[in-house]
Amino acid sequence: MRIGLFVTCLGDTLFPEAPKATVTVLERLGHDVVFPRDQTCCGQLHQNSGYLDEARALARRFTAIFGDFDAVVSPSSSCVGAVRELSPEIAPRVFELSEFLVGQLGVEDVGAYFPHRVTYHPTCHSLRVVRVGAAPRRLLLAVRGLELVELPEADECCGFGGTFAVKNPDTSTAMLADKCRSVLATGAEVVTAVDGSCLMQIGGGLSRQRTGVGTMHLAEILAS
Amino acid sequence: MNEARDEILARTRAAIREGTPPDPLARAYRTTGVVDDPGRVALLGERLLDYRARVEHTTATALRDLLDEIARGDRIGVPRGLPETWRPANSVEDDGLSTHELDALDGVITGCTVAIAETGTLVLAGGEMEGRRALTLVPDVHICVVRTDQIVETVPEAFAALLGREHRPLTFVSGPSATSDIELERVEGVHGPRTLIVVIVKEAS
Amino acid sequence: MTSFPEAARIALGDSQLRHNLRNATTTIRDKRARVVAEVPDWDELREAGRAIKADVMRRLDEYLLQFEESVQAAGGQVHWARDGAEANAIVLDVARAHDVTEVVKVKSLTTDEIGLNEALAAGGVHAIETDFAELILQLDGDWPSHILVPAIHRNRSEIRDLFMRTIADGRELSDDPRELADTARLYLREKFLDAKVGVSGANFGIAETGTLVVVESEGNGRMCTTLPPVLVTVLGIEKLLPTFADLEVFLQLLPRSSTGERMNPYTSLWTGVTIGDGPQEFHVVLLDNGRTRVLSDQVGRQALHCIRCSACLNVCPVYRRTGGHAYGSVYPGPIGAILTPQLRGVANAKSLPYASSLCGACYEVCPVKIDIPSVLLHLRAQTEKDVAERIAMRSLARIFGNVRLYEWAQRLARAGEGPARRVPGPLASWTQTRDLKPFAKETFREWWSRERGA
């Protein structure tokens, strides 16, 4: 199976740990991963900001770059959701990492060891757009040493929402404050999710409050 | 007037000129129930209690005594077609009472056309034993007699039973009047009857 | 109108409001979830609801004519109003024809939308709001903040004080909700018994039969539509349903989605005039007021499917924090964010399509499956952008369109990043409350080249 890795523009530039970990996990399971160098952005940023023509042009570009792979895997449910809508021709072959591991490869135990107390934030797009279901939780439960603690009001949005955080900073901050409070209530050392952008929001809030709680992408935990 | 009508219709037609034809309509929802007769009666009672209605079970022969007991000699309004045996001692027939006269009644006794078990709903359809709408609205206590053969399980079954009565004034009653406008705390009784008493009569089979 | 972010900032500063909202929306949301979970065919009902509404929109002209004919055949009078002013004038004319200075009115968003009460007042007719919450707001000169629980932002002691100032006739009141409800009952009862003209909206109008439907809890809807000898109902043209039997779908979807009850206490259905029962003169006003404009947009049109249940408000993380007033419209929350810009024109409400994090919770609970996030994106594409943003987004599109430019921009961004954790410019608002993640020392693609060589 030819697997194309879609790292996403934010993953490439701001949090390369997540795509790197994705490579580690997939290769550990014996798969070859290809990184098409021409990839940039899937078009989501422009679509969410109301620039549909630009979004469609970027989506066409994306389809051309990833069209030949048996599977395209990405550590971002939000970008996978956008690709499925903007590039319908390849939509059935594009997967978020956790759904690919559990749903396509049938793997739950990826051989990870992570002896920490962890809470999981189900991001909105993983929950309601890509519908990864229980896949991330099942992967986490199979990690040796990991203690998974329930996040109160888990399915509430963290307040990121792409341009929402910039255009509606006060509301976004109020949402973030509640999310940080929920995370702190769990006593977890690490909060994890399948979207780097949401983790950037939550991590930014936790760091500003000097809580000492870290953020890690699910892929990073699975690669440990 | 006709100018507005013509323009709205023209705008509507212009707006929908383009587009795909309507999808075939799928009615894949339940249209019949699965619960047996006693189960349906029990479900209706349970759902009405949830709304804090009072529920009484009786038989045709014991009905009159029960209604007398509930009425306690109060002035109770009744629609014209209510059978003699359903009328308590001090009943007042609605022969076109004024709203103030209705307001002076202590309560009202009526029948219903159909009752929906799943939602705890009584449907009044303005029939001989149900009377006009004001009669079951203004008095503070509504006593509604339901025969077990009038009880259906689901909402679609009730609509099937209402076929032919579409043009009548219909009132779906599910519990006493209520509001939750103050901090979402439910209070029974604002403008409609504050007390709803449902008497379920088992038919002789 | 004030932009959403500005209005939201004010609302967010009101901690009592945020507390009330959180409690109220959480309570209704949980109730809804419980009663929806017990319906085995919920998805089938939603799909039927969606399909019926889609059919109504595509054949609206036919259904409007059929409805008109049915109402007239049943002894009712049908009026058409292109906008709010025309509708208001029709209602005022009816009131004047009967020489009244007061009408009793049941809560209706449609009449709020067109400012009917104000128009009647200007014509010397006082419309008494009879819904408990609407009465509270009317007595206090306030306006609704929630579709279903309009006074969701008021607590019991505020209401007690208000009633003692206005309708309690000098009596001392406690803040017990029952006593407060009794006070309203007493005050309004005389109004109902003597009313000559009633005014209502309606949840549904049935094309096949000409039947109107009002779904409510308190009984004030029954009072207003039954006791006055004359009744006027204002109906948005999108509220039609093809057949009487279609109600079997919507009377299951609406109460559970709205109040979280299996059925609301009272639903009234009437068709024209019935001799000896209820109003003997009946008028219905069919209102456009921007609806045909919404209809002409094939994506945005689904906003007209809304049955005003307010489930989307209660699950919306934005609404739950800002409340309804920030939306600057009688239609708040996610549905308001797509309906208001379309009714008024996107240019007149351009911040609303952005008043969402696109979390999708609204779509999930919508009983008629309105894809609110998609419509929001569709409307964002129609908003006029400011010049600086447009230049930035076009440049970004060019950069994303060429991988060499993209790699160059990555290096430039990293080099330009200072040690500051709070930055100026468009990201300043971000860094006021959160730390900005620094650019990675090595991008993924640099790592890949170093490790894999290609």
Image (cartoon, rainbow, N blue to C red):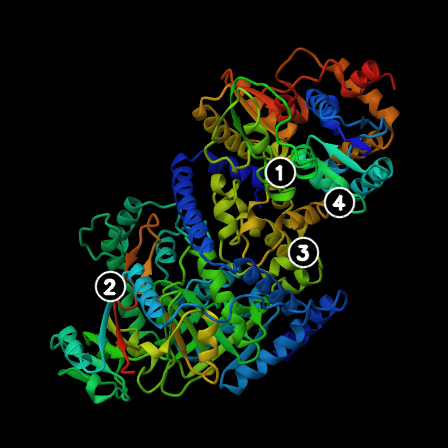
Q: Which mark is residue C300?
A: 3
Q: Residue furthest left?
A: B73
- Look at 69% across and 20% down and name the residue there: A17
Residue with the mark numbered 4: A92
Of circles 1 and 4, the one toward us is 4
Provide the chain ID for the residue under circle 2.
C
The residues bearing labels 2 and 4 have C-alpha atoms spaced at a distance of 63 Å
Res A159 seen here: no
Of circles 1 and 3, the one toward us is 1
Dot 2 and dot 4 residues touching (CB under 8 Å): no
Q: Nearer the viewer, residue A85 or C136?
A: A85
Eyeballing the image, is B11 above or below B166?
Answer: above
The residues bearing labels 1 and 3 have C-alpha atoms spaced at a distance of 25 Å
What amino acid is labelled 3 in the image? Answer: Gly
Q: Which mark is residue A126?
A: 1
Of circles 4 and 3, the one toward us is 4
Q: Which mark is residue C186?
A: 2
Same chain for marks 1 and 4?
yes
Q: Residue furthest top?
A: C419
* Label 4 secondary element: helix
Same chain for marks 2 and 1?
no
- Look at 61% across and 45% down and name the residue there: C352
